[in-house]
Amino acid sequence: MYLPYDTKDTNTTEGIPCAISTGTDYFSDKQRGFSSGGGEIIASNSSSFCDKSDQSLPLKNDVYAFIAVAPVMSTPFFFALYVVFVKYCVCGLLAFGIQFDNIGASGPADDVVKFLLIPVAIAMQEDLVHVYASVANIIYDGNVLKISQSATQYKLIFAFILRFIDGLLGLYVNFALMLDTSGALNIMLNFAALHFLQGIDDVFFGLVEQGFFGDVMEHMSTLCKQVTFPRRSVSGCMTEVDSMLFFLTLAVCFSVYGVYVSGIIDYV
């Protein structure tokens, strides 16, 4: 269906990045700018760029959102704790089963594959990376209490701590199993097999959204999707924390890998 130029700005699809308007006002300003030497074009264009400090960041749609938003003595809160506990148990059992019996049995080709996959192992940890990004970009806003009185700053921090532990456990399991595995194909298959750990909390949140656990849980998932936080100003140094934390984690993993390859420590 054809949309007149004067209505296109109000009918844009949500999620498309901000761009320069192409309405009638833009072309009239452009013509005036040519006649005045172009100064008005620069002023018009400079004001049309997105300001990241004005954007809002939503909560990630998984069970950790219940921990941040739902009342402590409520079904959604305990449901989220149960799912997190299950993830911890699965990661713990996998970590306990890694005996490091194959350390030193890998060939040079396997060591190269492991070296190349270290950044992939970190990037796959969605919970860990999300915590890094949230610490750098999210500012708590008391206006979220209008949506849920239980969405306090302390509960948000508690949810991030649980998510951080989850991400560290997942990274350890992936990284340790990679070091203990010989054969390029086996290393790749282990990465694919362990990827299901990242989606446990997402799967359960999806079931809640579809009403499998009752109307109360479904309503809470709707509230969680309404909660947003303001983005930290791009001019501050805190916005670089996520990059620093990511590369710090990468440096630690590379250091452990270097010790493993050098054979300094006798694993047997």
Image (cartoon, rainbow, N blue to C red):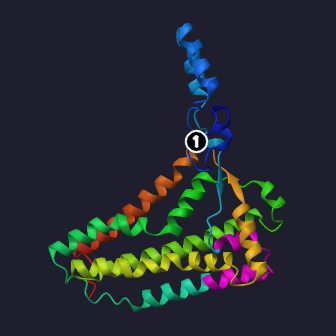
Left or right of 60: which side holds 223?
right
Q: Eyeballing the image, is 42 above or below 181?
A: above
107 or 261: nearer the eye?
107
131 or 207: nearer the eye?
207
Position of residue 72 measured from the top left corner of the image (x, y, whole percent):
78, 77
261 or 8: nearer the eye?
8
Position of residue 220 measured from the top left corner of the image (x, y, whole percent):
75, 73
Left or right of 251: which side holds 115?
left
In the rendered structure, does residue 103 fall within the stretch colored magenta?
Answer: no
Left or right of 82: which side holds 268?
left
Q: Residue pushed farthest front?
A: 1
Dominant secondary structure, magenta: helix
Position of residue 19 measured from the top left corner of the image (x, y, whole percent):
55, 36
The residue segment tinted magenta is: 64-83
Q: Eyeballing the image, is 127 above or below 187?
A: above
Q: Quadrant of residue 122?
A: bottom left
Viewport quadrant of the C terminus: bottom left
For the point 38% across and 82% down, the residue is 193
Q: Amino acid at mark 1?
A: Val
For the point 46% across and 80% down, the residue is 196
Left or right of 30: which side holds 145?
right
Position of residue 18 measured from the top left corner of the image (x, y, whole percent):
58, 40
Structural crowding at the residue carrying mark 1, measured as other residues with C-alpha within 10 Å and reported as few (<14), some (14–19) or many (≥20): some
For the point 60% across and 24% down, the residue is 26
Q: Eyeballing the image, is 228 above or below 171?
A: above
Determine whether the residue tagged by mark 1 lies in a helix, strand or loop. Answer: loop
Residue under label 1, please give it.
234
